[in-house]
Amino acid sequence: MVKFKPNIWRRFFIWLSRTWQKTYPAPSVRKGAALAVFVLIGLFCVGFGWFIRPGLPGVLDGLAGVVFFVLMAFLIVLAAALSLKMLSGLPRFLNTSGLVAMIVLIFILAESNMPFFTAVMLALVLGAAAALLGGGLAALFKREFKFERPLKKILVFAKVIVPVAIFIYCIIWLIDSGTTKYLVEQPVSTLQVEALDANNPSRPGPFKVLTMTYGSGTDKHRPEFGEEAVLKTEPVDASPFLKDSKGFKVKFRKWYWGFGFKEFPVNGRVWYPAGDGPFPLVLIVHGNHKMQQYSDPGYAYLGELMASRGFIFVSVDENFFNGSFMSGLSRENDGRGWMLLQHLKVWHEWNRIEGNPFFEKVDINNIGLIGHSRGGEAAAIAGNFNRLSRYPDDAAVTFDFDFSIKAIIAIAPSDQQYRPAGQPNPLKNINYLVFQGAHDADVSIFMGARQYERVKFTDKNYWFKASLYTYRSNHGQFNTIWGDNDWGKPMGIILNRKALLDGEEQRTISRVYISAFLETTLHGNRSYLPLFHDYRLIRDWLPDDIYINRFEDSTFKKICDFEEDVDVTTATFDGAEISSKNLAVWREADLKFRSSRTKENNVVFLGWRGTASERQGDSLPSYSIEMPENPSPGGEFSHDSLLIFSLADADEKIPEPEEEEAEQDKKDKEKAEKADKKEKKKKEKEEKNKKPLKLSIELISKDGTKAKLPLDRFMPVPPVIKSRFTKISNESSLYGKAYEPTMQTYELPLALFKEEYPAFDPGQLRVIRFVFDLGREGVIILDNIGFSAS
């Protein structure tokens, strides 16, 4: 063993010390580096602070936010400096103040919406670039610089040029609107669908449109609800619904608005038709946004359209439920819903008071509610509260509403921010429409799908519910005030806005569907009902995009919804039995959003492997539901029946089969060849996965007659549509998976099977079979199998 003498260690440390001294930056360079990082922090404070406005008049509003951020940064600097003082042996390239500045920069970015790791890395890169730039400039302007050796001058110039290049790149990246390279194209379908024989509901109607506003008469920010309000309303006490909001933020809000929770105003913007009426009444309410950037004018485009078509349309002001920086309310969505019902009370009063401009002009038997974001959840809450006699969370608060609300529309709604009595909000015996964009960077998961599942039909009246999922829609462009920046400024600059539909195109979707839904449910115009069954009937009315829709009405009879028990061989329909053959995947499970959160909807996953040519004869995979021989009354099929189910591509890999044990004497060459083949097969499989899944539907009557048609004959399986919300390449920590399985409803007329197979009798249907005999291997999600009259 070699022993080192003490003088060898001494020489080593002397050499290390001298080397460090040679490379150690001069004090002026270190001060320049630290100063540059502080300047960068100042720029961030100005950028963030200018958009965090507390509500002061004029330019003071933005300056107050800047001052707040500067004070916060100063306090963090003090805390970080004190912490560093307690540590020793830290390298001092930036000196203590520079290290403190880097910590503050990391904190500022980490508090933004971007992923924590991305924020830290960006802070380190920008901070290091600023430090290099500051140090380089400090060295460049030293008097001794002209006497330095050429190599050192080159290094100093590099310290200036490299960070400048980094900052230029960052600026270009921030200015860029994003990418569309990942977008999925709609597969070309040869199936021709006849266009709907009706007028485009997004076009103006025959009525002249009038406008007015009503409100408290005392609003200090908006004269249209203050002295210019045409009709004055009394404030209402919302305090029972805002119990969790206390402290400084409540005082701040009262200072800004001029009223507290016990004096919430009843304010609204009205578009109404010139005529005698009576006209159906529709209220729309916005969601959460900056309370100083008023959201209620953002639905004027809908107000003008609907009033021209014979509706009284009101955009409800609930900006005082919204938040500002550090002054947001919590658990307030029940209050938002309750407030809608307060507006309906006022309209009922006006309708029966002689001399009021709306005397006997309101059709109080036909009322609709629309909500966007939190407002979408609030509309559903109002639909529930409307039929209750007491507040679920405090029975001392009584309700006396019972209005004739027949339609609820939710635009990209939140869900379960409020849970009545700790339960998900129920809705029954009401028409419901929900739509959502796959590029919604705010409500990034289709929360409205949960409320859709909870809408139940229990009486003998006709009701229906529908949903629409649009690929390139975002959250904000359904409101003209909110726009294409779902995060707000300044952080919204990192969103991928290039992939979005144009704002007017996106609002065309809401015009078409909202107008058609209200015409159907409140005007009784059933000519628009088919478009909720199948979006393809109105492709000429919609922008070019990928759409997925669901539909269910009160005539629907369930066979399988996979909610009844944990036995995968039983069905919802009494006496029906389930079986399968040659499936690689068969499991019932809770469906998830793109994140790990539950959709509260049990479904069945079915997967099959191999090419179409390999899946023939005895190897053919299938999933069968056998109906009882003598179904209960109302459970019989007929020639006019529709077979209905919901289906989606799971975008799930088939588990590999267990490999047989290799023989001991197998040659290395054979192993290598097998590995090459496996890799080639894997690549081929990935290439094939780009194609939509295909399958067939086979129906078998009691006498054994079979009728089988490919699903593409009715509608192809929707493609796997992946979203990218930001310009950050890896955003999974923010949003989860790029793809969120969304179910498409299929309606298959049994008459078409009869037409292709004359011997088949739909009235004697016994077995429904999903046969995976076409296309590539894959996994589907299946739900809500049933039937109804056509």
Image (cartoon, rainbow, N blue to C red):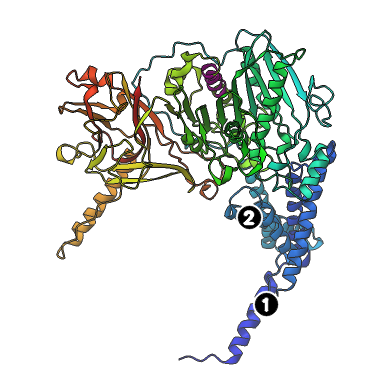
Residue sitting at 45 percent across and 22 percent down? 462
* Residue under pointer 2: 125
Residue 171, quarter of the rendered image: top right
Q: Mark 2, residues whose alpha carbon is within 10 Å: few (<14), some, or many (≥20)?
A: some
Q: 630 left or right of 89?
A: left
Whether residue 300 is visible: no
Q: CA distance from mark 2 to mark 1?
A: 29 Å
Q: Secondary structure at mark 1?
A: helix
Residue at 22% from the left image edge and 54% from the top image edge:
673
Q: Which segment is the magenta one?
A: 510-521
Residue located 80% across and 54% down the image: 71
Q: Relative to 378, is 509 above or below?
A: above
Amino acid type at image mark 1: Arg
Return the x and y of residue 214 as percentages of the image width and height.
76, 23
Q: Secondary structure at mark 2?
A: helix
Q: Position of residue 713 (x, y in %)?
A: 30, 23
| Residue 211 seen anywhere in this rendered image of the structure | yes
Whether the magenta-drawn stretch holds residue 624 is answered as: no
Q: Is residue 71 left or right of residue 642?
A: right
Can you identify the residue that label 1 sits on? 18
Q: Quadrant of residue 752?
A: top left
Residue 520 falls inside the magenta stretch: yes
